[in-house]
Amino acid sequence: MTQHEYIFVAVSIILGLALTRVLHSASLLVRAHSRVSFHWASALWGLTVMAYILQLWWVGWRLRDLPNWGFSDFLTLVVGSIFVYGSAELALPDPSESDLDMLSHNQRLGRLSAVSMLAYFLIGPYVNYVMFGVDLVPALVFPALGVALMALVIAVPSRFVIWSPIFSGYTLLILNLTI
């Protein structure tokens, strides 16, 4: 077993749980459809968070050629996976709640999903610069855009219907750069 395979067992477990969480929440919301006040921006948010789960998994494969792994590399990927899990956990409302207004959820508790994504974007420069050897400016600029966008989601939740499609557009840019 290579170092990469060994390290990615832990990362894959966390990412698998995150993916399960988003899909499980979505299926429970479908089952409770008569009590759910659906909103496209919230559904788009959940899909976008799911894209980051898959993106991190894919980027992890590209790290297979990293010759020397340090504990800081391992810790960075595990912590990043935990942040993505946190975002997945809070991306959609819990159907056991009495208020199943999806937009209201994202403007209140769902903002913690954005806090977790913000933290995830903070590890981006380390992965980009240290692990992939990307030039410093792009390694900082693209994650900084994500941090700024998440700060807007957190600070101005009343504009969530604007932030969600912008976040999705930003995600498409990141996917295009990393996949």
Image (spheres, grey):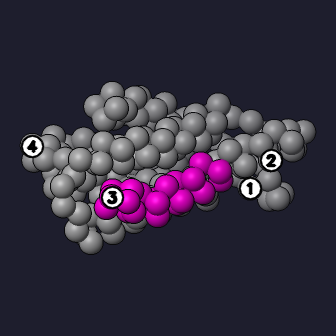
Q: Looking at this view, is 53 or 92 the one in front?
A: 53
Closer to the eye: label 3 or 1: 3
* Direction from residue 13 to residue 125 in the image, left or right: left
Mark 3, other Cα within 10 Å: few <14 / some 14–19 / many ≥20: few
How far separated are the C-alphas under marks 4 and 2? 43 Å
* Residue holding disc 4: 135
Q: At numbered mark 1, what does the secondary structure look like: helix, strand or loop?
A: loop
Closer to the eye: label 4 or 1: 4
Mark 2, other Cα within 10 Å: few <14 / some 14–19 / many ≥20: some
Q: Taking the image as drawn, is residue 163 in sight?
A: no
Q: Amino acid at mark 2?
A: Leu
- Choose the circle earlier in sequence order: 1 or 2: 2
* Residue holding disc 3: 2
Q: Residue furthest front?
A: 1
Mark 1, other Cα within 10 Å: few <14 / some 14–19 / many ≥20: some
Range shown magenta? 1-21
Mark 4, other Cα within 10 Å: few <14 / some 14–19 / many ≥20: few
Where is residue 35? Give x, y as percent: 87, 44
* Residue holding disc 1: 94
Cβ–Cβ under 8 Å for marks 3 and 1 = no
* Residue holding disc 2: 28
* Direction from residue 108 to residue 14 in the image, left or right: left
- Choose the circle earlier in sequence order: 3 or 4: 3
Q: At numbered mark 2, what does the secondary structure look like: helix, strand or loop?
A: helix
- Choose the circle earlier in sequence order: 3 or 1: 3
Q: At numbered mark 4, what does the secondary structure look like: helix, strand or loop?
A: loop
How far separated are the C-alphas under marks 4 and 1? 41 Å
Where is residue 10? Give x, y as percent: 46, 64
* Direction from residue 17 to residue 147 in the image, left or right: left
